[in-house]
Amino acid sequence: MGKKVIHVGEIGAGDTAKLVNNLLLGANMVAVAEALALGVKAGLKPEVLYNIISQSSGSSYALTAKYNNFIAKGNFEPGFMIDLQYKDLQLAVDTAKDLKMPLVIGNLSQQMYEVARAKGLGTEDISAVLKLYEEWGNIEVREEQA
């Protein structure tokens, strides 16, 4: 259970708030993966990128929670699995369709997790979406281990 309780409204409103939060997490993780991969492809070290971005306007929970323990180490044992993130994004997409609300980034993010699932990454941590960009860019986003 969380440490903070926030009343969000009628029955079901809490589920919707969770869905919206997880939509943002999923999209942010894809953006983090894409940005780190681009920087590494351009010749920057991932730890330098992390140090800059984590203290700048591009920072996000997805970056700060997933970089040190997952991405930098190449450890994609699940904290939160791609399969679960995909499910949450499906719920957001379904809700948006019911409300006749376009969800451009949400749909695109979900498709990135679908690609990851198709490659057999469904039981890995959501940060493993980075592996798609690593394959496409023929790079590896890892810190050098001393």
Image (cartoon, rainbow, N blue to C red):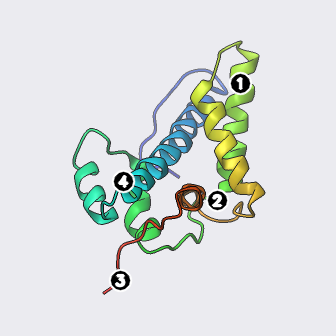
Residue type at numbered disc 4: Gly
Q: Position of residue 120 (x, y in %)?
A: 75, 64
Q: Residues within 10 Å of mark 4 (few under 14, many from 20)?
A: some
- Which residue, given by chain and number where applicable, does mark 4 sit on? 39
Q: Residues within 10 Å of mark 2 (few under 14, many from 20)?
A: some
Q: Position of residue 106 (x, y in %)?
A: 61, 32
Residue type at numbered disc 3: Gln
Above or below, 85 against 9 in this view is below
Q: Residue 73 appears in which quarter of the rendering?
A: bottom left
Q: Residues within 10 Å of mark 3 (few under 14, many from 20)?
A: few
Above or below, 88 against 68 in this view is above
- Which residue, given by chain and number where applicable, does mark 3 sit on? 145
| Disc with the residue nearer the chain's start (1 vs 4) | 4
In three-dimensional space, the C-alpha distance between marks 3 and 4, rounded to whole angstroms, equals 19 Å
Image quarter where the C terminus lies is: bottom left
Q: Nearer the viewer, residue 38 or 16?
A: 38
In three-dimensional space, the C-alpha distance between marks 2 and 1, rounded to whole angstroms, equals 21 Å
| Disc with the residue nearer the chain's start (2 vs 4) | 4
Disc 1 versus disc 4: nearer the observer: 4
- Which residue, given by chain and number where applicable, does mark 1 sit on? 95
Disc 3 versus disc 4: nearer the observer: 4
Disc 1 versus disc 3: nearer the observer: 3
Q: Nearer the viewer, residue 7 or 144?
A: 144
